[in-house]
Image: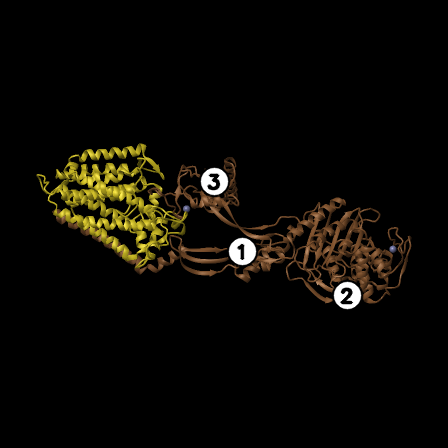
Chain colours: A brown, B yellow
Amino acid sequence: MFERRLRILAMLGGLYLLAIVFRLFDMQVLESERWRLQAAELGQRTIRLTARRGTILDRNGVPLAEDRIQMNLNLRLDRRDDGSWICAGCGKPLHTEYEQPPRRCRTCGGVAFAPGEQPDWSRLPGLLGITNEEFAERGREAGRRYDRAVKTEMDRRKKNWGSARLRDVKNVLLPREWLFFEDAGSAAVKEVVLHPDRYWGVVVRPVRRRRRVEHPSIRRTIGKLGPVTEADARKMREDDGLSFSSIWRMRVGRSGLERKLEDRLSCREGRKVVERNRRGEVRTVLSERPARDGTDVRITLDLRLQKKMYEALARTCALHQSDGGAFVAIDPANGEVLAMVGFASENELWDPAISSIVPGSVFKVVTAIAALETGLIDPGETLFCDSGRWNGIGCAGHAHGETGLVSGIYDSCNKYFAWTATKIGVELWSDWGKRLGFGKPTGIEITREMGGLVPDRDWKVRAYRKNPEYWDTDAFTASDLRQAGFGRGPVLVTPVQVARFMAIIANGGRFVTPSLVMGEGKVGEVVMRTSLPLVREGLKATVTRGTARGKGLDRYRVAGKTGTAEVKPGKKIHHSWFAGYAPAENPRVAFACLIKNTPSYGADAATPVILAFLDEVFRK
Amino acid sequence: MDWRIIVTLSILTLLSLLFLHSAGYDASSGRTLPFASKQLVWILLSAGALLLLLRVPYRTLLEHAYLLYWAGIALLLIVRVAGTELNNARRWIDLKFMLLQPSEFMKVILIIALARYIRWRDDYKKLSGLVRPFALTLLPVALILSQPDLGTSLLFVPILFALLFVAGAKAKHLLLVVLMGLLVAPVLFFGFLKEYQQKRILVFIGQETLSASMKENEGYHLNRSRIAVGSGGLTGKGYSQGDQRVPENETDFIFTVIAEEWGLMGALFTIFLYVALLVFLLLNAVTCREPSGKLIIVGVTTLIFVQTAVNIAMTVGLAPITGLTLPFLSYGGSSLLSLTLAIGLVLNVRLYPDFVFKRDF
Ligand SMILES: [Zn+2]
Ligand SMILES: [Zn+2]
């Protein structure tokens, strides 16, 4: 009886096991392919391969803007008050009825803890260099941000669909990690990484951040990064086949060098689709698109010199009650911009170095060159300048006597150049202004560079249409030309244009295309031929016996031209200029300096800045 | 001493350590959780307990069978009142160094108690005589079911049936009880099971047509387990090269890891080990001359068979997911200890062959 019945039981059991074996055979051999596909789908991971944006270096290799990996500490937050288990890995609740500790999360495989099991974070505040109180406050703040996000999302869902489940909001819609501490030191990071059991809930996340030199002498020139615009995004998607999600994560140059050098600096994130085993080791690589790093770019500016010049400019502006100014220096031999600083005491965003402004007497040099190159005046012919007015134009009370081209430059005689301009005529005069680089941006690698203005007949027509009350006629009158001839009226220039203009004179009349990138400045065809000796003579005499004499500029054998542009007629406020090059015989630097809205005249205001620059350059 | 059993058990234990190590990898922290080394401690403790048990003739245990039974019931009651609650279930007593799960030991105690009860009677051959052995079984079942712990509680009934059957109870009576059980099943299903337990069963029934959301929620374990087993193929992905993460794969789903990493070959090897163990146990039941010894061996064999078969069936979708561990392979101290003690009972019966009671079947 017993053994017979035992045999029956054993047979029943055997049958059941046989059923299991058949099932296993069915699943693992016959249907294996189907499960393998599902497994592959689940086991696939896309790994982002991060790329490095190129570094902007200064002339001496000092990094001005570079990508840095910064370690952020994030908190995994999920506040549950029903006492159930939550996953430290992903914050999801666990609802299985039978497991024993340690519990495993069914979503991410992480180890879970109950709200009662507080991890030990006591060493962390010290390592982060903050007090326990600050530490706790940061935790609370992360929690509050989380709570606010929960509430906002709940409200939104309730409004849109009339109801919302807290669980859905928490599990699906919210980020699991919340920033807790930015740029943590290596000691704290090491502690967290080495003791995962102590720091359940704290995650180290490496984040790529652009670090730039924040000194005001160079900040604007470097520019900054921002999100991709929609048009750019579409283009990138077409060109590089990037997914929108990775495009939206990208940051591209939005201003300054960052934008102008975007092609060179920009990098492309790569992607790798892999199959991994449970240990996270890669088993097969399904597809890979390598990351592309950006290239580093060395620029012509020198951070130390920029800072020096900014200080000098700021000091000088304060001394002369000016609200701002600019200094630009260019190497006449190759167009490298050696220094470019703008200072504006009120408007941080506005850069005077690349903004249009009235040139005043500096522009007389343009008229002089036009006159000599066209051959429309005889350089020996003179105009007698008395203390009175000539066609309404005076020389600020000075009487320059018999004035020729050279003395007109060094004495800065308004009447002489007004007279000369009328001899040249508006077409040729404005043509020469444009040939010498005025009226359009120089093209240096910086955003928002303005072009200035060289007035011509077309300009007058447009100006009259725009503002008929202001102008008597739409024709370019002789009066207009006389005013423009000595740099007043509608003429507008930028300090960069003026510095480039001086560089052209300094290097023997060849056109200069300035550049902020090492080796990319250009010196082109000759634009000044016959005018060069006399103009140089005039510029040199300005310092030795003209309007800039006795200021100490002759110490470096500077040649140049002063300028004092009235802001409003009658008011004793000017834009004071000095532009030139040094040394006069064998120029190595060309520069322009502008001090805005100052009661001081020409070289008086600008000289200290120029001397500061020349001290730096020639002291060595 | 039955060395066949000891050797089979040792191979199973080695297999257990091997795959607990593989299953112990924790992706969120990048560490391997020390399942294998912790389990080794339990293996040594269980071996010690086994040796201790062998020093006590099973006659002594049988003499105190009811005392053991009521002590077990008392522990289950203590759990009801003062047990440690984890995950909405109250089934552990916190002993500070371990979490004691009385229901695990109740399985072994019940085998002794039923052997003692059936040994001295034959009224179970009448229908009315079935009431008391059923009551003896259903009392702990009810207590364990209320913890709630569906899986463990369902182990007790097959043991009772197997013992009554081999002892010579009328087959038609047992069938009648099964029919009655089927009739009240819907009542139990809707009246006593919690919502998630109901869902588990529904998911099991409809496993071929799960919706995407079911696969991510109620059907998650089942779906993931089947994917892991199925994708293992004939020869598997290689030791520790599995890529599927089935939760609790160190406890209830350890078989999944074996089937994924060693494929059908590994799965069959594991099943073969169990078959060998069960056959060796049954051979002892045949050679044993003493009825209560026979009953104890049949009870232990049934226990190990049901737990093994249900656990493996659950990983391949042939049984609903109930939370039964795989004997000697799954991670967990209480389960290993109680099953080792059960094996100890069998070895004990073999160790004292001259111990013969007056009456025989
Ligand atoms: Zn998780
Ligand atoms: Zn004059």
The CB of the residue at mark 1 lies under 8 Å from ligand 1: no
- Mark positioned earlier in the residue sequence (1 or 3): 1
**Residue A225 x %, y %:** 59, 52
Q: CA distance from mark 3 to mark 2?
A: 69 Å
Q: Are marks 1 and 3 in contact (CB under 8 Å)?
A: no
SS for callout 2 = loop
Q: Which residue is mark 1?
A: A52
Neighbours of disc 3 within 10 Å: few (<14), some (14-19), many (20+): some
Above or below residue A239? Residue A563 is above
Q: Amino acid at mark 1?
A: Arg
Q: Amino acid at mark 3?
A: Leu
Above or below residue B321? Residue A274 is below
- Work out whether residue B178 or residue A102 is closer to the camera in this orientation and state it: A102
Q: Circle 2 marks a residue in which chain?
A: A
Neighbours of disc 1 within 10 Å: few (<14), some (14-19), many (20+): many
Q: Which residue is mark 2?
A: A528
**Residue A43 visible in this rendered orientation of the protein:** yes
Ligand 2 shows up in the quarter that is bottom right
**Residue A402 x %, y %:** 90, 58
Q: Are marks 3 and 2 in contact (CB under 8 Å)?
A: no
The answer to whether dots 3 and 2 both sit on one chain is: yes
Which label lies toward us, 1 or 2? 2
- Mark positioned earlier in the residue sequence (1 or 2): 1
SS for callout 3 = helix
Q: Circle 3 marks a residue in which chain?
A: A
- Mark positioned earlier in the residue sequence (3 or 2): 3
**Residue A597 x %, y %:** 77, 47
Q: Amino acid at mark 2?
A: Met
- Work out whether residue B32 or residue A594 is closer to the camera in this orientation and state it: A594
Give the quarter of the figure containing the C terminus of chain B.
top left
Residue A33's quadrant in the figure? Answer: bottom left
Q: Which residue is mark 3?
A: A124
